[in-house]
Amino acid sequence: MLRPRKLPRETKLWNQAFPAQCCIVQSLVTPTQQVVKMAGILDVPKPRINCSMLSQHISRPVCFVGRVEKVHPTGKTFTVADGEGKIATVELNDPLEEELSGVVEVIGMVSNKGAIMATTYNMLREDKGIAFDLELYNEALKVIQDFPQHYPFEVAASG
Amino acid sequence: MTQLTEGAIEALSNGTGCNDAVLQLVNIRKIEGGNGSPRYRVMMSDGKHTLSSFMLSTQLNYMAEENILAPNCICVLKRHVTNILKDGRRVVIILEIDVIEPAGEVAGKLGDPTPYTEGQSKGPQSAPAPEVRPPLQPQNRNEVNRGFTKDFGKKAPSAMPSTPGGSSKVVPIASLNPYQSKWTIRARVTNKSSIRTWSNSRGDGKLFSMEIVDESGEIRVTGFNQEVDKFFSLIEVGKVYYVSKGSLKIANKQYTSVKNDYEMTLNGESTFIPCEDSCDVPIVQCDFVSISDLENRDKDAIVDVIGVCKGVEEITRLTTKTNREVSKRTLNLMDMSGKVVTVTLWGEEAEKFDGSGQPIVAIKGAKLSDFGGRSLSASFSSTLMINPDIPEAYKLRGWYDKEGHAIDGQSLTEMKGGSGGGNTNWKTLSDVKTEHLGHGDKADYYTCIATIVYLRKENCLYQACPSQDCNKKVVDQQNGMFRCEKCDKEFPNFKYRLILSANIADYADNQWVTCFQESAEAILGQNAAYLGQLKDSNEAAFDEVFQQANFNTFVFRSRVKLETYNDESRIKATVMDVKPVDHKDYSKRLIMNIRKLSA
């Protein structure tokens, strides 16, 4: 799992626009096996989901935002709670190298057991900016789900 | 002999209606109307029943005056309308009636009709009728008519449900109407306003008003001029009185929230007699709305609420536009729905209010507004009751002591950020054009979220008078002095002030707006003096400020008005306030609008 690193100021703006893809820049700097996997998932549309939508996205890349509940002592897995309070499990390839807390955005594939095999994650710092309102995010997710005709993300991503 | 339509009286009385009923007019009586013109009350028979609650519509008064309608004549009721009085009684208003057999040609009473009763309180009326009938029956038919007329004559005054002299027979407030003038009611005064004076082109006057309540309902009572002197000091809130001889008229709903179609005015003959026996009369009549329900009510609705006072703020003093100082206090009310609403008290009530110990507060006639979502205001006509002696209050106290005190309560009134502080009228920039905002006599205010797409650097600064509060442009005298016309003084210096012309846009449309000092400084992120300096010294840095400010998104509160300048009318928009976007509030609003649209 590539650790998010502090990047030069000039690219900070770009990274705010494309948070997940900041890893590509890093991949250019430190080529690893992960690059291939990473590039694969980053080019593909990743619908934002919550726990109730996990079952519909098995074996598909997704983006899951939730609050960190418990971290396994090994550091290779942790649980997250979504805006509705339901829990999902996140599994990592490499153990965590830092303290994980608050709201995180996880990008990965959904396994057949309903866990998220994370490719990368992004911690939304609580001490910076405005606190992330998870319930409001959940409401927005529901709106996106209810009106897919107005939110053609699949088309936009591949276009 | 023409046949009468039997059963017609029953049908008319029940409201099932009856077309072209053939009825016999038993009696007709003149009643002096309140506004000068007489009304005629008619008793009709269908051979089976008689009903005396027929009123002749005023346009047919001539029929009574010219004796076309006279006792015994047979008529066809062509058009009528049935009105239901407050106490459930029906009055049939005769709009069109044809006499098919004049009185002279009819021998006498047809059939043997009995007065039709619906179980109403016409006790004194129905009692004499059966008593009189049996002895009349064996008599000559012609005499029956006379007997009945006598009966009707006797019945008529007792049909007025009270005897002159006040306190013996009391009627419910719900039965009061302008067509009956001799009544007495027994009621408790729930609310007495202070004396208000006015002076207009017709002269001066003073008035006071109050609301009185009894078991059947409530009614508003107003006294003017002399009645103010007579009754104001006499009447105390909470006491029960016998009231009689007030004049009734249709309620002016603009001034009252009381649930009654009529309102009473005290006149020279009105009497207010204190009543000792007051236990039956309810203390107050309220139709409480649960706080969570307030969201569903329209703004400006008058409601009654009851709740626990969770907290109260300090008194603040404001000066109104008319330069009057008024005290204001807000308190938070919570009820069993778990929702909290902010209530504003004014004047004396604000000062007297003691919110310690979480009292149960009931407000009757509070005004609902959409200030900050939903909030209530106790206006002049509202009654504020602390720990009232009513069952709802006890229920609330019990609930609060058990569970309520622990609940935090969800407030309907947004006090922090978001839509707090003034009615936010959210519009998109295309709405401004389609709704022709600003085209009326007054300026329109609206709020929108938009992005700055262009800022005009040229002429954004002007030299203004350096004196405090004077922003008038000064004239450069070219001798190192600057003259202000408003202050009529010359100054060796000036202060730079901003007038920024900007083009803002949202997904729907764009708009040119003008931003003055405060808003402009907020947008540019620099103060006017510094900008003035930059403009003169460092052109590049000055441009940079404008570049940076471009394409930022803000919440704009704007004022738009149609202005005519040399025969040309244009919409001018001025930005009153600029604020950074509160994304949470924006998201919530968007989600709410999306859901509303899809419903």
Image (cartoon, coloured by chain):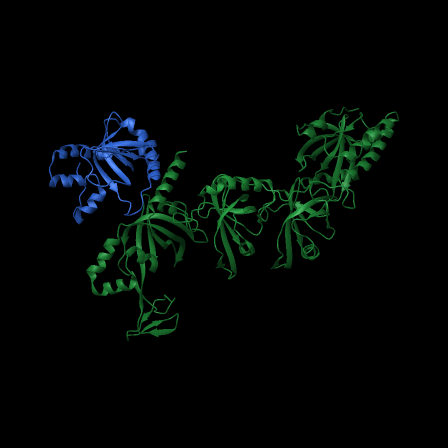
Chain colours: A blue, B green
Residue positioned most to the right:
B139
Q: Which quadrant of the rendered structure holds the N terminus of chain B?
A: top right
Residue B592 vertical placement versus B461 (above, below):
above
Residue at point 50%, 62% (across, down): B323
B325 to the left or right of B94? left
Instruction: State the image coordinates of residue B35 (x, y, percent, origin top left).
Output: 70, 47
B62 to the left or right of B493? right
Q: Nearer the viewer, residue B304 or B575?
A: B304
Instruction: State the image coordinates of residue B426 (x, y, percent, origin top left).
Output: 39, 46
Residue at point 80%, 26% (across, down): B110
Residue positioned most to the bottom:
B479
Residue A49 vertical placement versus B556 (above, below):
above
Q: Which quadrant of the rendered structure holds the C terminus of chain B?
A: top left
B540 to the left or right of B100? left
Tell me if I can see residue B552 in this picture. yes
Instruction: State the image coordinates of residue A10 (x, y, percent, origin top left).
Output: 17, 48
